[in-house]
Image: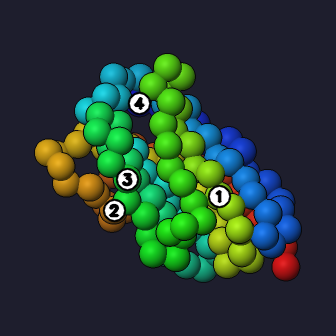
Amino acid sequence: QVQLVESGGGLVQAGGSLRLSCAASGRTFISYVMGWFRQAPGKEREFVAATSWSSGDVYYEDSVKGRFTISRDNANITVYLQMNSLKPEDTAVYYCAAVPAHGVYMPRRRHEFDYWGQGTQVTVSS
């Protein structure tokens, strides 16, 4: 059974940084795409970033490009989201997600991912 466990959320001032972690277990993830989504109160869950575990290809939502970096650690089967220059509008619950890859296609819609973590809260104060 796939398990995704996020950690690393917290309260930070605007301009600060946080690194989120997603520990994955229950599968061999080499053929998976791993993603990060976020959901602010009263809003839809939205795509943030994704990476192919096998190729290392990455894709970002426009508003986080240049500020957020998604990466993976093969040895620890962990995916990270390094978030720099945080803004109050980045405040949300951040979720890790996973789905088996289909060729080179990089999914970025909520319904395209099969597995989800429980989420970790990120709050950015102004």
> Residue 8, percent across and down?
72, 45
**Extreme residue toward the top, this view:** 75
User: Circle 1 is placed at which residue position?
Assistant: 83
Q: How far apart are marks 1 and 2 (CA)?
A: 19 Å
Q: Is 64 placed above or below 53 here? A: below
Pick whichever, 17 or 120, lies toward us. 17
Residue, x 68% and y 48% (percent of image)? Answer: 19
Q: Which residue lies furthest to the front in this view?
A: 66
Q: Mark 4 points at which residue?
A: 2
Residue 67 in percent (x, y) is at: 60, 65
Between marks 4 and 1 in the image, the one whose residue lies nearer the viewer: 1
Residue at x 35% of width, y 42% of height? 56
Q: Nearer the viewer, mark 2 or mark 4?
A: 2
* Relative side of 114 to 49, left or right: left
Q: Which label number is shown at residue 58? A: 3
Q: How far apart are marks 4 and 3 (CA)?
A: 22 Å
